[in-house]
Amino acid sequence: MQDALLALTRYWTERGAMVVQPFNTEVGAGTLNPATVLRVLGPEPWRVAYVEPSVRPDDARYGENPNRLQTHTQFQVVLKPDPGNPQELYLGSLEALGIDIHAHDVRFVEDNWASPALGAWGLGWEVWLDGLEITQFTYFQQAGGQTLDPVSVEITYGVERIMMALQGVAHFKDIAYAPGISYGEAFGQAEYEMSRFYLDDADVETQRRLFEDYAAEARRLLDARLPVPAHVHVLKCSHTFNVLDARGAVSTTERAKAFARMRGLAREVAGLWSQRRAELGHPLGTADLPAALPAPTEFPVVEGTRTLLFEIGTEELPPHEVTRTAAAVRTALAAKLDGTRLGHGEVRTHATPRRIVAIVDSVEPVEPDAERTVRGPRASAAFDADGNPTKAAAGFARGQGVDASALQRIDVDGVEYVGITRTDLGRGALEVLSGLLGELVAELRADKNMRWSDPKLSFTRPVRWLVALLGDTQVPVVASALAAGRETRVHRTAATPVLPVESAEGYLDFLASHGVVADQEVRRARIVAAAAELAESVGGHVEGEDALIDEITNLVEEPNAVLGSFEPRYLDLPAEILTTVMRKHQRYLPVRDAQGTLLPHFVAVANGACDHDTVRAGNEAVLRARYEDASFFWRADLQTPPERMKEGIAKLAFEERLGSVAQRADRIAAVALDLATEVSTVDSSTVDIEVLRRAAALAKFDLGSQMVIELTSLAGTMAREYARRAGEPEAVAQALYDMELPRSGGGAVPATAPGALLALADRFDLLAGLFAVGAKPTGSSDPFGLRRAGAGVVAILRAHPSLRAITVPRGLAAAAERVRAQGIEVSDAVLAEVAEFVLRRYEQQLLDAGHPHEQVSAVLVLGAAPVVADETLAELSTRVGDPDFAALVAALQRVRRIVPAGTEPGYDPAVLTEPAEVSLHQVFDKARAAAGTGLAEFTSAAAVLTGPVNVFFDDILVMAPDPALRAARLGLLAAIRDWAAPVLDWQALGSSLDG
Amino acid sequence: MQDALLALTRYWTERGAMVVQPFNTEVGAGTLNPATVLRVLGPEPWRVAYVEPSVRPDDARYGENPNRLQTHTQFQVVLKPDPGNPQELYLGSLEALGIDIHAHDVRFVEDNWASPALGAWGLGWEVWLDGLEITQFTYFQQAGGQTLDPVSVEITYGVERIMMALQGVAHFKDIAYAPGISYGEAFGQAEYEMSRFYLDDADVETQRRLFEDYAAEARRLLDARLPVPAHVHVLKCSHTFNVLDARGAVSTTERAKAFARMRGLAREVAGLWSQRRAELGHPLGTADLPAALPAPTEFPVVEGTRTLLFEIGTEELPPHEVTRTAAAVRTALAAKLDGTRLGHGEVRTHATPRRIVAIVDSVEPVEPDAERTVRGPRASAAFDADGNPTKAAAGFARGQGVDASALQRIDVDGVEYVGITRTDLGRGALEVLSGLLGELVAELRADKNMRWSDPKLSFTRPVRWLVALLGDTQVPVVASALAAGRETRVHRTAATPVLPVESAEGYLDFLASHGVVADQEVRRARIVAAAAELAESVGGHVEGEDALIDEITNLVEEPNAVLGSFEPRYLDLPAEILTTVMRKHQRYLPVRDAQGTLLPHFVAVANGACDHDTVRAGNEAVLRARYEDASFFWRADLQTPPERMKEGIAKLAFEERLGSVAQRADRIAAVALDLATEVSTVDSSTVDIEVLRRAAALAKFDLGSQMVIELTSLAGTMAREYARRAGEPEAVAQALYDMELPRSGGGAVPATAPGALLALADRFDLLAGLFAVGAKPTGSSDPFGLRRAGAGVVAILRAHPSLRAITVPRGLAAAAERVRAQGIEVSDAVLAEVAEFVLRRYEQQLLDAGHPHEQVSAVLVLGAAPVVADETLAELSTRVGDPDFAALVAALQRVRRIVPAGTEPGYDPAVLTEPAEVSLHQVFDKARAAAGTGLAEFTSAAAVLTGPVNVFFDDILVMAPDPALRAARLGLLAAIRDWAAPVLDWQALGSSLDG
């Protein structure tokens, strides 16, 4: 391994990097070394390479986990500015390490990086070597809250992983570190002992004190304008925080506070460093960046109708941006062409991770000329009595550069003006295309955009080359510092990675002949076919993986599917674990048999030609390591009965004031049982109370399992598995699974009532508790996922009509009671705020589902019970365009408008004497007696009111001079208003139902 | 510079060293990295190389000092076990750095290393490159209080220094660090800011708290049996201590306490680490060491009388050991030869830093045979009445392996025994020599001894080879794992560094022909001659440097004197500064003109052939850098008047309870003036009180100068210089100089009375104050130099008879008064203890001067005033062998013996009636009236008592039955006793004066 570090050092120093030493206080990553985090600031150039033993107390495993270490070795490279070819330089470094990049599948897979604690972020990739993440590659965009200009490229090698792969060993301890000495021999004892310190033996009170002392020292040093020692102390703060965290001594609130404090200090350090460098006159000078090129001025003439090819070459795009950008470019290009007179055929786009290709058929060689009328003054004002041009006409003519005699009369909407007709000469196709293609590049945007070495461009990843050909003629296109040519790029490992394109017409075939399948559909079909074929070879098939296949399609230019296998013994693990690892971590397609059961195989899709055996072996090793981890946790967990596992969660801090996860689980259990009584009073068969009671007792127990600590997304899933295996009734297991649902907006909701009750209780507790302690979400921050919790409440209630008795306020009240029992004040105002917060989530769901906002507003009054509101909304939607209903609505709105707020609904019918008012009274009396609770019943009962209400308003003076009479009339109307009010917010409907 | 680090890394990895990273918490030296300080413990082999940025807060200079950095770069190599040729490997590494070791003067100059805080020490060298210290090279003997077995070789390169020398730059900032970037550009800002932190801005209270927290955490981790994290926290402790120290916030007491604490922790860490490694079964195995060779059993026969050559080849010996060992080997070899019958001529030894050579002339080829008589029983018991052998005789004969008939009669001191005569056959010379030469090596010892890879040998530096030749025959000698041969070694850079010696007779010439001058006298003469010649070439000469020339003689094998120069402007500095730097730091001979004034030249003596220009330039650069430092301090100091400089010492902590150095200076001033009144009452002309007053006011002011802070040995010297230049009277300047004298045992004492008074006050204050606060020295530790202070008090008082009024108790009382004024209790018991402590120093001085211990004991009773005791002792020594004086002494001792302790001296003469008692009474009365205070006067008066005392004892029964008579007789004797007592302790003389 030491040779590898030397090889990397040599490689990068030969490319102009300076070498510095690892930092001499503990850092969590090479990024934190001032040689990165401070040097990326400001305009000075900087190229550096160094080893950084990176300390992550949380990753301490006593040296037992084959892949995880409390101190792992990073090799860090910073290139500032971006040299324009950092990926190619990086690949060269892999070759320097002895990696045959032609045999292996090396890929750049989207992975963005952000460190809120550093006020830093960047876009980039994790680099995969046969599926193994070996490097983090980032274009650093911000640090210490400052936008970086120029941008730096940061390359971080995970050295142990690379070594394990190269040496083919399965445990870091087996890495040959130096001749005759293994990694374990060299560092095993330290790994064990430092793990002990971080996980078990560090003194919490001491570490807390250290944190405060370091933070205070950093503060003082900032005040003394010394960014370097201030930074050192921020690092010490950060490490101490990590130690506390590994010791399990940081509550979520404390975490948020500590992060805010560290972030604030880090930002100040960065700001001060930048100032100090400026004051020192930027000792290293200012980085040179390529300049924007001048716009082309010469445009050759082309002949005949040809195809336009415009290829925008990029570094690996995030998969979702591949599809999105292809569509956006098509739209934009079509629109831009439409803005010209250039004749052309269909506009198509194709996309791969490395290129967006626009192809336009049948582009004419020139624009036709066009006539254009320029309007001057009205004819009536253009000529004097003698028919001579007036001053106005003469001025217009002069302005247009023509003689007044050339003015013509033109008719515009029946009014006569003077004017002239001009001919715009058609431009050559190249001139037209040059401008708009340049704009197209400059206007590229993605969800998240970045800068690189280009002075103006901004996109999701760097744009590195452009090819613009009209037929076989180069279109002179310039976008900032990029000039289009005919040189495209194929696989980086190809014999000739840069190749000239002969003509637009042959482009797709030409690319294909070099292995690049530009057409997404073709590529996808190939993947599907290859995967099917490979799966079939082992008697299986791939099913239900459309989203993953879409993603894979956007991860490769030349799909090269490889069938891998894993040891069948791993099939003993629950399928969810296996597929979660395959899909989320590795983008492997699971292979199933005819019954849908997993087979011990997977399909990985490599990019480009490579050695199948090598790539297979690599991917299998990665999966084996991950499955080995999972098996280890699985076996360990199965040794532990659920009850005992649950004891473990008492050690997990949830939130400083709200206590441990165990306390939260207890509250949830109590609230769920509380809410069950509510439901049972309505319908005692709804909830199996024994199931609920048992599930409540076990609630959240799997958070104490090693599996869930490692793979948090399996919470609930593991609860069900472990409960089943511990002999719990299936209904209990299911309830425990259900209680974690929904996992996301639109995700599956609990299938069972006990599960739904637990899930609700979970979310009510979260909302009531955190709002009570002042941890409600802000615009940019929602660390506890309260928005998701609120949406979850709504989704569950909407999916479980049988639980309609549980309103949001009722649920929150039950939760508040338990929170209060812990001595925490939960005011009614807070609960009202939470209810409103939940209501907003409901509103959003309805709007997102496409319901008209008037209808949504109308039913939101019922939102405390979303099922009821849903039903009302459904009913309402059947009434759209129903004139009777619209009339009823109008009538009810009229009633509401006329009655002043605060008017009491009572009235003395005896006072009413006019026929219209008597009639309304009588019809209303009858309707009121007939109506039920829902909108349908109300409507059928209330429909008879429309006429009488309208007649009443036509015939009766509500504001009669006689006070008693006025009161009775108003009282009648108020009674109607109040009768209709609970059904929905009639006013909110406006006239939206008129159809 | 980064290339140099890579080159070193490559060089050492190619030689089997593992590479580790710098440690990730601040360390003061590469030694502290666990890869050294823990790995040197125990039996496991270990070879490691690494870069270590070493943080020394105390060396922070804001980046302004060209040679000093708060973080400098060490390159550290550990070889465990000692590979047998570490110096040769090291020289190879210099070549790997591009250093032409043939052109440069590379030398290994004694420099031992000890870190009390680590419980660690080792012996070794600093390596000089043309006079520049570039590497520390140590055989690590102990760490964490544990004796190391096997021993490790530790090589620590000072990378910045090497780079400055190689690149020929005068400031570290100008080092080319990487292509296009200088050291200053890369690290200048950090150097400045971290200096600010360490020197000015670190918060003292915070750092104190951190120290406590780290120490406590280390403690806990030791209890948890985790040596690695415990070590990390000891390092953090240590760094924090260094920060506090650089902030000037550590008093001497605090320092001692902190060191004790850190030492204790470090020892425990080491112990625990060793235990843990043993428990783990020593995962790296056990280092292989050479085995001891079997003793030779075959000894060829030689003919004729030949010269014996025995060369003990070593690594560079400390200079004082070269001479000492040569003498010791001569003595030991002569004694061993005398223990044999082997005929031989003169035994001579020669020595260089790398070899001890014994040459014995005219060694006979064999020992002569020898006859030996073995005595049996007395003849009377050997034969029975019949003349037959008794059982005893028979048994004796059997035991001797002869027949009883072979017994002879032998006469021993007139008694007749039986016995036999045996012949011991003479052994061959080779057999005789083999044994004793082997022993000679095994018994080599020095003041400080070390181990290396040899399993048994121990010496001041490793013994690496042996040559043993008798004439041209190899003597088979084995010492542990070393076998003697005929291969000697010449300069390491010679074309053939290992050469066979033909014969003992030609050895010295053979060596000389290869440049090695083995004879010390010859070598010394060459140095003197060469230095004289070089000095003469610039019109100067070298004078009064005998001790330095002796040292240089022992630093080189082939003296190669080089004349260097420095810029004459440095001559503006006081000569003491220039010569201190030349002699103590560089071993350069100063060159003076006929008037003894320094010339801007020096003579450096290189070892072996080298390029004179290269070596001259290197040495000149080193001296320039040192003088540049000194000039900087000098100029800065001259800007500051003495009064203001003195203000600075208020910031220097002296001791926690005794306060700052300024408080101490104030106390000294007051005590000196106090003591002056004592002297003035005796003789008002002794002390110029105005001079004393002014000097007292300025006392210690130069401790506030930059020069003295850098070169502490110039305290006093700089006071005189700065005082003169500030226009102070010469007498004041001299007093300030004097007050720091004597600097060492036997060193010069103050020349003037005011200086002597200040020097006494200084030492009385030190003694009284530190004893009072409980900081008296222990057997192994005397951090404040109290023994030296006590000896100084005595030396000053002895040298200044005019100050005889100042007794030690009087001086201590005066000092105590000032200490008490600061609220510190100083008990009389403590003062008595200090007085006794000082008296012991005086006793030691007298014994060291060779005075007989009886006489010393006799005058010690007068030691409160050493001058008086000295005078008595001088008188006493004139009396040795004087029978009258001896008789007087015996008489007085007899008186003292007979009188019980506590007997009152009064008596009634009227009671005395016997002639002998009356006579004694009368003679005593007269003598008492005549006597003065000194011994001479007493003796001349008392001499008449001898006879009467003896008669008294012959004639008189002292213990008369009549109580009154008995009381009078005892009273008379007691009066004589008490009269004689103050003169000296007569009893202590014993019979030592009998001659």
Image: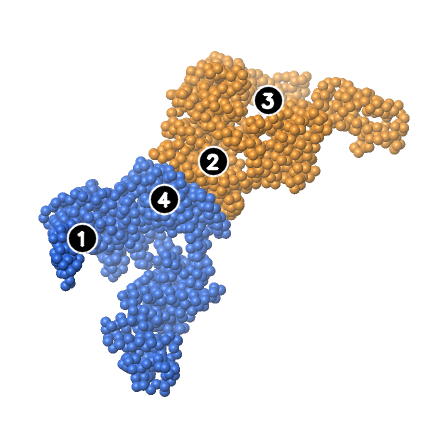
Chain colours: A orange, B blue
Which residue does the numbered mark 1 point to in the structure image? B395
Q: Position of residue B885 (x, y in %)?
A: 26, 76
Q: In the displayed structure, does residue B929 sit left or right of residue A273?
A: left
Q: How many marks?
A: 4
- Among numbered discs 2 and 3, the one appearing first in the sequence: 2
Q: Nearer the viewer, residue B257 or B922?
A: B922
Near mark 4 (Cα within 10 A), the count class, few <14, some 14-19 or many ≥20, is many
Q: Is residue A84 above or below residue B227?
A: above
> Which numbered mark, 2 or 1, is in the foreground of this view?
1
The secondary structure type at the circle numbered 2 is loop
Near mark 1 (Cα within 10 A), the count class, few <14, some 14-19 or many ≥20, is some
Q: In the displayed structure, does residue A347 sit left or right of residue A819?
A: left
> Which numbered mark, 3 or 4, is in the foreground of this view?
4
Q: What subunit carries mark 2?
A: A
Q: What subunit carries mark 3?
A: A
Q: Which mark is residue A61?
A: 2
Q: Position of residue B220 (x, y in %)?
A: 47, 46
Determine if marks 1 and 3 fall on one subunit: no
Near mark 3 (Cα within 10 A), the count class, few <14, some 14-19 or many ≥20, is many
| CB under 8 Å between discs 2 and 3 | no
Which residue does the numbered mark 3 point to in the structure image? A397
Q: What subunit carries mark 4?
A: B
As measured in the structure, the alpha-carbon distance from the residue carrying label 2 to the one carrying label 4 is: 27 Å
Q: Quadrant of residue B788?
A: bottom left
* Any part of residue A970 in sight: yes
Query: Disc 2 residue type?
Result: Arg
